[in-house]
Image (cartoon, rainbow, N blue to C red):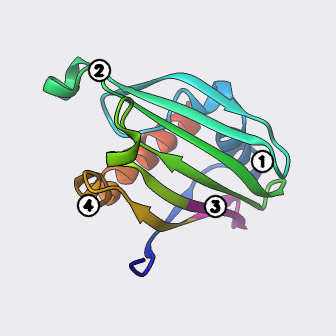
Amino acid sequence: MAEAKVVEFERVYDAPVEKVWQAWTDPQQLKLWWGPNDVTIPECEIDLRVGGRWHIVMEATEGMGEYAGTRWPMEGKLTVVEPNSRIAFAAEAWVDGDKEGTIIDQVQEISFAKDNGKTKMNLKITINKIGPKAGMAVEGMKQGFGEQFNKLNKFLED
């Protein structure tokens, strides 16, 4: 197997840690900001305990042109739950209808720290397996997560 690929992000949000934590762990809030631009989240479940389920489905809107209607499920299991501090999950994400070809097996680790009244968030994604048709999705992660974190920032401002 190829060496794992690691992608890391850091953002500072002008919001208290508790508010950022809730945005990440409350399914109703997460549905409002998760994913890159031009997607909706029709399904989201989080069983907030170690061993609990992490389930999100992104669906492309008309803004994604030819991809409109495409669904990208992510199914995982929480491995770390430390309220207002850390959360991690092992998950698989794929294009609905082609799991084998498009799978991205990953571990996401998110940490939250107080920073002068703001919250510093770090996200580390370790990609362990990439399906033969998933290379473009992995290459687009930086842009997609950048858009997602901008959406989170706007959500936290409201």
Which residues are the magenta region? 107-122
Res. 37 in view? yes
In the drawing, does residue 33 fall left or right of residue 62?
right
Looking at the image, do the residues carrying marks 4 and 2 touch, with CB atoms under 8 Å apart? no
Q: Position of residue 42 (x, y in %)?
A: 51, 19
Which amino acid is tagged 3? Ile
Instruction: Determine which residue is flagged by label 3.
Output: 110
Q: Secondary structure at mark 1?
A: helix
Main SS type for the magenta part?
strand
Residue 18, labelled with which disc? 1
Q: Secondary structure at mark 3?
A: strand
Instruction: Determine which residue is flagged by label 2.
Output: 61
Say if 1 sits above or below 86 in the image: below
**Residue sticking out furthest to the bottom:** 3
Q: Position of residue 35 (x, y in %)?
A: 43, 39
Judge whether residue 49 is colored magenta.
Answer: no
Looking at the image, do the residues carrying marks 1 and 4 touch, with CB atoms under 8 Å apart? no
Instruction: Determine which residue is flagged by label 4.
Output: 139
* Rendered image quadrant of residue 47: top right
Q: Secondary structure at mark 2?
A: loop
Mark earlier in primary sequence (3, 1): 1
Which amino acid is tagged 4? Glu
Mark earlier in primary sequence (2, 3): 2
Instruction: State which quarter of the image contains the N terminus.
Output: bottom left
